Amino acid sequence: MPPAYLLLAKLAANILLASSLSRLLQRRLGQTLPGLAGSQLLPLWPALVGGLLLSGGRDLSGVQVLEPIALVLLGWRGGYYFNMVLDHLLASEPAPQCHVCDATQANPRFIRRQGLDFCSHNCWYIHLKNILTVKPVIFDQQGMFIRQEVYPMSFSEYSPPEALELLQGNTGYVYVDVRSTPEYELGHPAGAYNVPLFHRQATGMTPNPDFLQVMEKAFPPESKLLVGCQSGQRSARAAEALVAAGYTCVANVRGGFGGVRDQFGRVVEKGWLELGLPVEQGSPADQGYAALALKEKE
């Protein structure tokens, strides 16, 4: 046999030896010798013995030392990667489990949708029905608003004069001020309700985790809502959350109560107060946040 083929045959034999003996040692030793029996280092020892034996007991001086070194190193790494491939081939796929009814039988009707397993189309439809009724989470653990996945035109936008026209035109719209209660009590559009998206605390603004819950108690999903804040930013996020929660007629009031200003304090868009529209102060008994939070769901 030519020397090159003989060397390849020795190398293949050493890889198989390193793989088989390391698997046997792994089962016997387990974790008792973690430094010597690690999954990467364990094939080295049988590869070392096999490399020395397969080199034919030659003189290990000069160039003759290259063959046993090659047999040991390539047998070691080859045995390790051969074990990886073998483990992957022998690994059994876990039986699918239905996301809805937890069925785990080997049912040929199992389907996979959105990365989840379902034993039948009926369970898939039940899952779709359930996720449509789950209320959105609007704040993360750090109190940051989570942008809701709604269509860009899912809510309208009106200027303060347009909002006042809707309120006075017997259209059924109500104004919901989502500023904090102290801001609301200092001044708000006449007739406005108050459901804060954020509460003002001594340490700053903190999210109101009950925002959607109070809104649902006070206003049915089909209510016509004009949502406003100080400048229109908080109210845009609130409108987004309301649409995601199932409200079908929501509008954001651009400019809000105090208007929009640029970084130099110049007025970009006038708000309700600067336009001289009807304003109230205080917290009306049936429109303030405290009353709405205690209200029974309609």
Image: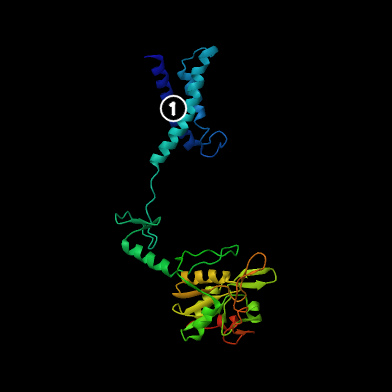
- In this picture, residue 29 sits left or right of residue 12: right
Q: Which of 113 and 107 is in front in this view?
A: 113
Residue at numbered disc 1: 15
On the image, the x and y values in percent for residue 226 come to: 51, 77
Q: In which quarter of the image is the N terminus?
A: top left
Q: Nearer the viewer, residue 276 or 246?
A: 276
Total marks in image: 1
On the image, the x and y values in percent for residue 30 come to: 51, 39
The residue at the point 52 percent across, 79 percent down is 163
When the figure is inspected, residue 74 is found, relative to residue 244, above or below; the finding is above
When the figure is inspected, residue 105 is found, relative to residue 132, above or below; the finding is above
Visible residue check, residue 201: yes
On the image, the x and y values in percent for residue 217 come to: 50, 80
On the image, the x and y values in percent for residue 21 come to: 45, 30
Where on the picture, by quarter, is residue 185?
bottom right
Q: Which color scheme did the rendering employ for the protein?
A: rainbow
Q: Which residue lies furthest to the right in this view?
A: 202
Q: Which of 247 and 35 is in front in this view?
A: 247
Where on the picture, by quarter, is residue 112?
bottom left
Structural crowding at the residue carrying mark 1, measured as other residues with C-alpha within 10 Å and reported as few (<14), some (14–19) or many (≥20): many
When the figure is inspected, residue 261 is found, relative to residue 160, above or below; the finding is above
The residue at the point 56 percent across, 75 percent down is 228
Q: What element carries label 1?
A: helix
The residue at the point 64 percent across, 81 percent down is 187
- In this picture, residue 31 sits left or right of residue 90: right
Visible residue check, residue 21: no
Where on the picture, by quarter, is residue 283?
bottom right
- In this picture, residue 89 sits left or right of residue 76: left
The residue at the point 69 percent across, 68 percent down is 203
Looking at the picture, which amino acid does disc 1 mark? Ile
